[in-house]
Structures are given as structure tokens and as C-alpha cells.
Amino acid sequence: MQHTAFQGGFTDAPIQAAHAFRACLNAMARPGELQQIAGAAPPAPLSVAAGTVLLTLCDPETPVYLAGAHSAKPIQDWVTFHTAAPLVGPSEAHFALGIWDALPPLTEYRIGTPEYPDRSATLIVECTDLDEATHMLAGPGIKATRAAFLPEAAAFTANHALFPLGLDFYFTAGDQLTGLPRTTRLEAL
Amino acid sequence: MTEYNYAYLDEQTKRMIRRAILKGIAIPGYQVPFASREMPMPYGWGTGGVQVSAAVLTPDDTFKVIDQGADDTTNAVSIRKFFERTAQVRVTEATADATVIQTRHRIPEQDLAEGQILVYQVPIPEPLRFLEPRETETRKMHSLEDYGLMHVKLYEDIAQHGHIATSYAYPVKVEGRYVMDPSPIPKFDNPKLNMAAIQLFGAGREQRIYAVPPYTDVVSLDFDDHPFEPTKADHACDLCGSETSYLDEVIIDDAGGRMFVCSDTDFCRCRRAAGHVGRLGTALPEAAE
């Protein structure tokens, strides 16, 4: 059966969103720790994890930027139908979605203001695999250090230097999710 | 209760609260504004904590509510029943069994573990509010990291009383950046703010949410020559004999008689069940179980 924009949403939104939010919360509160998240069945190439994060956190109040291949018409239609989030460019977006190579320049996104650092974008980065650890993380939410997958180091080091301003990241692959808030420091693996 | 949505609040409200919680986690100690809703209880009874709990709970959770450490006070009982009906959660009084604990003005004596979430009810989230009433100014002070006024307040305590007389809602600095009000917990509890559990703070009337992720550096403000000191009544619990727990003083007659009991009722009950007996205590009948 062909995927249409009307399919693939939550079947029991309050319960599924509650479980999905706990995964989002744990991911952001324990940077780099793998979380399972499921519920949505979005059109390819959108992953289950990224689709579920969108359904859990986005609504008409949160402009979304779809980057690169993720701005294809089927995904646009799916996001619009299920979340009613306005689709915008990177500078207005509360949430941005795409593969790592499609999201830059990161300087385009909102990093908050000194008085309102929360008015910053959250980037959902689609990855092929989160299992292979590439960097060592430290900071709030991490007892000592934790090894985790990151697509590169320089961008996240620069983002951490902006604290308390800065971007927050989710990394998604299949039904797996990790988070990286602006507070996390990178250490050599 | 099928007349209401799961966990009482509508989905869009929960999404808004959830986004505020996530930004709070990303910026530890920073107060995130949120569009607080009217809840079926008056302001001052935990409307902020209840909204945070509603956004966090799933049907798999076990929920515990304490008010000044006690599970059996009006406020705790009614909030527990509220979520038992609207969120289909199991409820417990045992700290270790709970996955989400909503608290008013205490941190449980027992150390919390990874996987637990502690939700605080906060009356005044702004630690600088009684020093500077204007929100525009306090916001600017936080953005400039201008916390001199708070140190002046603590210094004036020392100048007037010889020691820092602030005994509850004792200000802390989170991860070396934001000064935060830990809600009116006794300063005895401040060292426990460094914990393995996620801490979420909700202020309903003041419309603020803030958070402290696990293993985050939380330091109570002090001076080199007047270091921070967590204090408690210099007694042992009269029911369970604990010398380390935070105590409530209870007047027991009109002739000046008084007793000290653990403020954490679950901690006290567990100790008595394990056979500890204090000065005025009797062995629990259920001590056998």
C-alpha cells in the first residue's frame, strides 16, 4: 500500500506521546545514552525516532525547518498533516530536521538571547547508526564520562562555548535516540 | 475518568510544557517561562508541580507525593488521588518504589536513583525576587551573571546575626552559571541536590519551569570564612531514633512538652519497621512484615 500523508501518526496519542516524551527527556538529561523511541510510522527517509520526536514536540506553535532530502513533498505533507507546524527556513525554526551534512551553516539557527536562552532551536540529526561511539562526553547528566556517537567534534565544541546560549541536538537512527544539550563538553576518546 | 484527556491536560498544553522542560534541562537552573494553566486546585497548592507531573507521567509509572516529607497530608493525598484517577498510575509511599515523586519542600532522606524523577512545587522561582521586585531587572541580572546582590544579602545575615540565618530556600549556583532557588526546602537538603535523579521544578502562579539534570554541580552560596552548613534540630527522632534525618518539632501537650519526629514519614516508617525505636516510640505492630 502506498504511504500517504494521512497514515503513520500516533494511534493513541496521549499514551504514545507520554512514553516518547520520557525518551526525549532521558536523552536530553543523560547526553549520549541510547534511548528507544517509537510510535510514529513516517514516510522514508524519515526515521521512526525522528518522526516520533516531531509528533511528540511539534505543533502549530513550533516552526519546523526540513533540510535537504527531508524537505521532500511526502515528508512536508506528513509533518504538516500530523503536527500542523509551519514549515520555515532555518533562521525562524524552533526545530530543524535533516542529515548532518544538510543542516549547516549552524550560525543560521536561533541560539536564544542572553535574557531568554531558551528561545533556541533544537536540531534533529538523522544518522545511519548510533551504536559506534566516536567521542567522549562530559558535563551535566553524565556521572564521569560517556562514550557516544557524534558526526563531528568542532561544531559541538563551538556550540558548547556559547553557553548559556546555543543549540540542542537530538540524534536519531531507526528507533534509537540520543541527545546532546549545549552543556555537554567533548573530551578525547 | 474517561471524561478527561490522559493526565488531565490537553495534548497541546502538555507539548508546550514538555518543550519548556527540555529547554530547562538543556540550561540547568535557568527559569523557562511557560503558559501555566488553571488547574483544579488553588495557586499555592502545587499547580506548577502538578502540571510538570502531568506532562511527565506515563501509565507505567509509580507515583509518590510528599508534602514537607509526609505522604499523608491533605495536599499530598489529593494530588496522589488526582493522578491515580486521571493518569492511571500506580501510587506508593515507598521512596524506592516510585519512578516519579512530586514533593513540596523536602527531598526524601533516601538517596534517589537513576531512572527516578523528582518534581518540586515552587512558590517563588526567582531567587532574586525579594531583593529586586522587577522581573525586567532580575532577568537582566541573570543574563549578566550579576549575583552580587545575593551575596550582599547573605553578608547582611552575617553582619546582623553572626551567621547566615537563611534556613530554607537557600540559594544555590547550578553548574557554575545560574543562581537558582531550590524551592523552600530546608538547607539541610541542599547537599542532596547533587543526585542521580532528574529534578524538575514547576511554579504555576509564576509560570516558570526549571530543571537540574542528574550529576549536575549544585553549590550552595557561601563565604570562605562562613562556609555553608546544613543544619537540623539537635535531637534524635523520638519515634525511630534516627540521628541523621531532618526533624519536625511537635508540641504534644500544653505544659511545654514536645517531641521531634522525622519529617520524612516513609523513612521513619521503614526504620521503625526494621526495629528501630526512639525515645517516645513503640515497636510497630507491623514490624514483623
Image: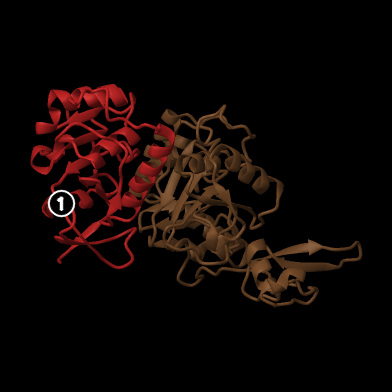
Chain colours: A red, B brown
Question: Which part of the image, by quadrant, shows the C terminus of chain B?
Answer: bottom right
Residue identified by numbered label 1: A129
Task: Name the residue located 39 percent from the left edge and 59 percent from the top edge.
Answer: B214
- Disc 1 marks a residue whose amino acid type is Asp
Residue B190 placed where, x, y %? 52, 62
Q: Is residue B264 visible?
A: no
Q: Is residue B142 left or right of residue B39?
A: left
Q: Nearer the viewer, residue A51 or A187?
A: A51
Residue B67 placed where, x, y %? 64, 52
Question: Which part of the image, by quadrant, shows the N terminus of chain B?
Answer: top right
The correct choice, above or below, for B156 with respect to A92 in the image is: below
Among all residues in the image, which is located at the extreme front? A1
Among all residues in the image, which is located at the extreme right? B255
The correct choice, above or below, for B252 with respect to A3 in the image is: below
Task: Name the residue located 28 percent from the left edge and 49 percent from the top edge.
Answer: A181
Q: Quadrant of residue B173?
A: bottom left
Mark 1 lies on a secondary structure that is loop
The correct choice, above or below, for B120 with respect to B232 in the image is: above
Task: Name the residue located 33 percent from the left edge and 48 percent from the top edge.
Answer: B26
Q: Chain of mark 1?
A: A
Task: Specify few, some or many for label 1: CA neighbours under 10 Å numbering under 14, 14-19, or 20 or more.
Answer: few
Task: Name the residue located 10 percent from the left edge and 38 percent from the top edge.
Answer: A105
Q: Nearer the viewer, residue A102 or A121?
A: A102
Q: Nearer the viewer, residue B8 or A105?
A: B8
Q: Quadrant of residue A166?
A: top left
Residue A68 placed where, x, y %? 9, 32
Q: Is residue A165 visible?
A: yes
